[in-house]
Image (cartoon, rainbow, N blue to C red):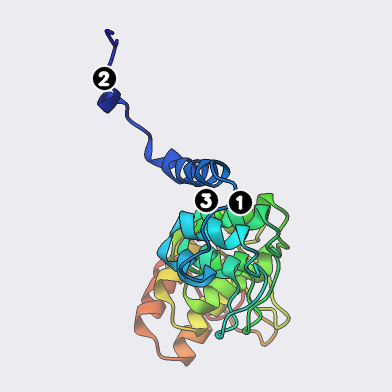
Amino acid sequence: MTYLFQPEDIMIPQRFLPHLLVLLATLATAGCAKPDPPTMNLYRAIRAGDINQISRNLYWGSDINAPDADGQYPLHVAASKGDVAIVRMLLDHGAQIDAANREGRSALYLALAAGKTQVARLLLKRGATFAPDALLFEMVRKGQDDRDVLNFLLRHGAGIDSRDRDGNAPLHIAVAHGHRRVARMLIDHGANVNAVNNTGETPLAIALRLENPDLIRLLKRNGATTTPLP
């Protein structure tokens, strides 16, 4: 038989590989009456990215919503790793999307903290609880300087000059924590360098108080003052 192309010439785009792995694992499971029991627990399988072992765990009834010794859930582990295919598998099998770990963090928070915006988009699409302003403040506090994360939050409703209970904008928080790269990103996205908090401080006033020369220079170069503008 003559082929128009050889099988080895078929190229599979990288973005389709996770879905192909899930499909192959599903077909392998469906091809026999009962798959073998897993040889590693669900958490180890997720950390290893082993689709076959994850499928076995799901078939044999491993508790998908039980935290491990560190208080992490299977969905948290997969979200932190940024494995979209595994996150989708867990959600399809009933993983609690808003479960909080021992520190009170959700899978969505952990995905953004790790810079895994593709997983964050999936979680949001599946109905994860989402408070964009609150998440922006949390990402700024922890020094998350991934531009994709900031863009994700801004596109989904976070305000670049939103305020916390003390009247601080994200730029105040970045300066107070010494996160120069985060402050730079916020300024690049249009943050008001002369915003005033409830105690009357601008970001530059905070930088001067903390004697942070790098942030002082950055703010001054972008028109910052120590007193509110009229």
Front residue of 174/216: it is 174
- Which amino acid lies under the numbered mark 3 shown in the image of this protein? Ala
Please identify the quarter of the rendering in which residue 6 is found. top left
Q: Residue furthest front?
A: 33
Q: Earlier in the sequence, mark 2 or mark 3?
A: 2
Total number of numbered discs in the rendering: 3
* Residue at 52% from the left image edge and 53% from the top image edge: 84
* Residue 161 horizontal/vertical position (percent): 63, 65
165 sits left or right of 50 in the view: right
For the residue carrying disc 2, how many other residues have a C-alpha within 10 Å: few (<14), some (14-19), or many (20+)? few
Foreground mark, 2 or 3? 2
Look at discs 2 and 1 and give the one toward the viewer: 2
| Marks 3 and 1, how far apart at CA | 10 Å
Q: Residues within 10 Å of mark 1 (few under 14, many from 20)?
A: some
Mark 2–mark 1 distance (CA, rounded to whole Å): 36 Å
Residue type at mark 2 is Gln
Q: Is residue 4 visible?
A: yes
Residue corresponding to mark 3: 85
